[in-house]
Every structure is written in C-alpha cells, then in structure tokens.
Image (spheres, rainbow, N blue to C red):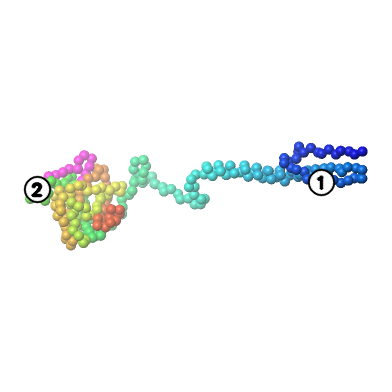
Amino acid sequence: MSETTQQPSTDSFVTGYVAPTVPPQNSGPDEPAALAAPIRPRRWPLLLGGMALGGVIATVPAVIVALTLAPAGTPAAGPTASAPTVSASSPTGGGGTPVASAPAAQGEVGDQLTDGGITVTVTSAEFVPDVMVSDNAGSTSATYAPQGPGDGARYFAVRTHVVNDGQKSIDLTCSSPITNVLIDDHGRKFDPLDGLYKIQGNPYCNDAVQPGFEADMTYVYRVPSSATITSWSFADAADPTSFSRLGTIVQVD
C-alpha cells in the first residue's frame, strides 16, 4: 500500500520562490515514485541584504537634509580672518561707524611742492572772519565788500603761489585745473567756494596762466565752526588719476 506524501506549506517561503523539481526515485517495483521534499531557501542572506538596503535608504534623507540646511557659500574648514577692531579711543561717526583719520602730510606751509605739471607753495593758511568779494571782479568799476560764512560756520583761507609747469594754459578761477580739498582731523574733505574769481586778489575769470608763468591764488572753504583743520590737498587735474587719489598733502594746522 502506498502512502501519499503531503507537500509542506510554502507560507513561510519567500514570495515568488519556486521550488526546484527533483526527479522521482523508485523505492521498489510496485511502489510509486515518492515526491521530493522542497528545498527551503536560506533566508539570512536576504535578511542581511534587506538590512543593508534599509540603512542606505535611511541615510540618504539625512544627507539631503544636511546639505539643504548647510549655508550657501560655507567656506572649507581652515583658519578664519578675524574682524578688524576699533579701539575705544578711535573717533566714530553716527551709529558707531569708525571715522577716517587725517592723512599724513608730505609738506607744510612754505614748502614748494609739485604734483604733475603744477607746482604750488602754500604761503599761509588760517581761519578768516570773512572774504572780500565782488560780482564785478575783473572790471575797472569793481567794488569789494566783506562776505561772512553764516551761522554755525567759519571760513578757512589757503593762500598759494602757483607755477604752471604743464603743457597748456590753466584758468585757476573759472575752471578746475587744480583738484583741491581742505581736510579736518576726522578726514572729512571740504570743497572750495564757488565763484573764486570774485575773491579780491584772485585771477579774473578766463585770465589763463600760460605754461611757464605763475600767479597768486586764494582758496576759501566754508567749514563747521567746530571743525579742526589739519591739511590741504591738491593735484594736477590734467592727470587722469587726480580725481581718484588724494593728491599732494600740505600740513596747515
């Protein structure tokens, strides 16, 4: 009498697994071939592979989040430059902004200094209560009257002797052949008054100084009453860099 061998359940098998077919073996001449027992797959390689894959999948979002949260332009690790410090005694402007100090002088009153094709000697530099001006300067009927700086201000006059060593004539009053500013102890730069030709003693408008000639010229500046003047700067305007550099510095304090 033959017994029927029941196939084991495949519920615990991996889904999709197909058991290999084993050729039947006869136990005897009258016995039917017995069914071979299916071979159970080894599940530990699959479990380990699944764990490794799960670790990779869990790591990828973390890396993406870290890259997303990293600030743009973050420099590589290394020495970092320290921020400049301002001492408590350094003068500051509004909001604690550091104020530039006065530049170093290259000469003083009485020195003959050359910048490009212009040679200048500052003969005097001082505060003045007013300046003598005339709207008809240059005419024989010109009359001069004092002009004050107004409330909260003072005039500072820089008297110079100018030699034109350049290649062209220069109009000292109605043109700008000499770039110039007055500088205080905080590095502030003040422009001269308009209408310098109106000031008594200055060359008239369009009274050009030819190459090789010279003339006296007074520059007057209106500054705050509290300003402490330290220096005066001039540069030959024929030099293309004259408006982007400070020029030749004369100490006038």
Q: Are marks 1 and 2 in contact (CB under 8 Å)?
A: no
State the image coordinates of residue 18 (x, y, percent, origin top left).
Answer: 75, 43
Looking at the image, can residue 156 be seen?
no
Marks 1 and 2 sit apart, C-alpha to C-alpha, by: 131 Å
Q: Nearer the viewer, residue 221 or 231?
A: 221
Which tag is nearer the camera, tag 1 or tag 2? 1
Most prominent secondary structure in the magenta stretch?
loop
Decide which of tag 1 and tag 2 comes sooner along the chain. 1
**Count of labels shown?**
2
Residue denoted by label 2: 142
Name the side, left or right, on which 224 lies relative to 17.
left
Name the residue located 92 percent from the left edge and 43 percent from the top edge.
Answer: 30
| Magenta part of the chain | 141-155
* Residue where numbered disc 1 is placed: 22
How dense is the environment of label 2, judged by Cα within 10 Å: few (below 14), some, or many (20 and up)?
Answer: few
> Is 151 inside the magenta-drawn segment?
yes
Instruction: Give the residue at x 48% y 47%.
Output: 73
